[in-house]
Image (cartoon, rainbow, N blue to C red):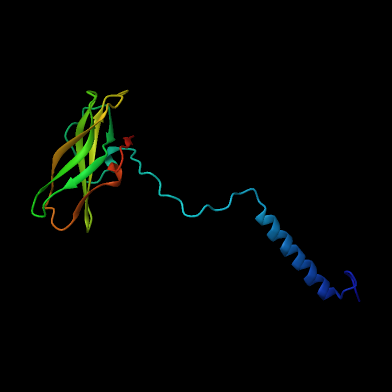
């Protein structure tokens, strides 16, 4: 007995099922969604509060708002209990050094510089500035580096 284009029922069902699968595959490929562009770049780090900084030491908390400074160099000797940090400060009088954070991993000492700001402060021209940051323990064999929060300046909050 033949039902579908003169084919036996079993063969007609297989042909119809195959046609349906091809139709679904084609419709899925023609959806309006863009093709996956590949791996995405990691998101820029953000800070919603000072409390997110591990190992934070605040020197001046009287400022109205805070940001991180871009750290350009961190150096220190293995036996030293301090590192020298060069960062981009500002020549504006409405913002100044307010604190720092140190986060030690197995192979790095990540340093973040915190700048205090008055609300509405427009940053001035970048001025290279160096400060010495005390450490809780000697630097040892870890490499001192800028933290992800101080690779560029980030507003906090």
Q: Position of residue 135 (x, y in %)?
A: 13, 47
Name the residue nearer the viewer: 61 or 78.
78
Q: Is residue 56 visible?
A: no
Query: In screen coordinates, is 42 left or right of 70?
Result: right
Q: Quadrant of the C terminus?
A: top left
Q: Position of residue 133 (x, y in %)?
A: 14, 42
Name the residue nearer the viewer: 128 or 133.
128
Q: Position of residue 142 (x, y in %)?
A: 18, 56
Query: In screen coordinates, is 18 left or right of 94?
Result: right
Residue 9 in the image: above or below residue 140: below
Q: Could you say which quadrant of the image residue 119 lies in?
A: top left
Number of residue marks: 0
Q: Residue at x 76, y 67 (%)?
A: 17
Query: In screen coordinates, is 14 left or right of 114?
Result: right
Residue 40 in the image: above or below residue 13: above
Q: Quadrant of the N terminus?
A: bottom right
Q: Residue at x 26, y 46 (%)?
A: 147
Q: Residue at x 26, y 37 (%)?
A: 69
Q: Is residue 60 visible?
A: yes
Q: Residue furthest left?
A: 79
Q: Position of residue 44 (x, y in %)?
A: 38, 44
Residue 4 in the image: above or below residue 51: below
């Amino acid at each position: 007995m033949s039902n579908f284009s003169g084919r036996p029922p079993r063969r007609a069902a297989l042909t119809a099922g195959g046609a349906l699968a091809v139709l679904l595959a084609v419709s899925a490929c023609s959806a309006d969604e863009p093709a996956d562009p590949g791996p995405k770049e990691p998101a820029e780090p953000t800070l919603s509060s000072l409390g997110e900084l591990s190992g934070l030491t605040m020197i001046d908390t009287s400022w109205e708002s805070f940001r991180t400074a871009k750290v350009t160099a961190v150096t220190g000797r293995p036996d030293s209990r301090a590192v020298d940090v060069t960062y981009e400060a500002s020549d504006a009088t409405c913002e100044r050094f307010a604190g720092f954070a140190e986060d030690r991993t197995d192979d790095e000492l990540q340093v973040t510089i915190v700048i205090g700001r008055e609300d509405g402060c427009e940053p001035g021209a970048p001025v290279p500035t160096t400060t010495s940051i005390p450490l809780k323990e000697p630097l040892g064999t870890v490499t001192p580096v800028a933290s992800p929060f101080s690779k560029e300046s980030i507003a906090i909050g």
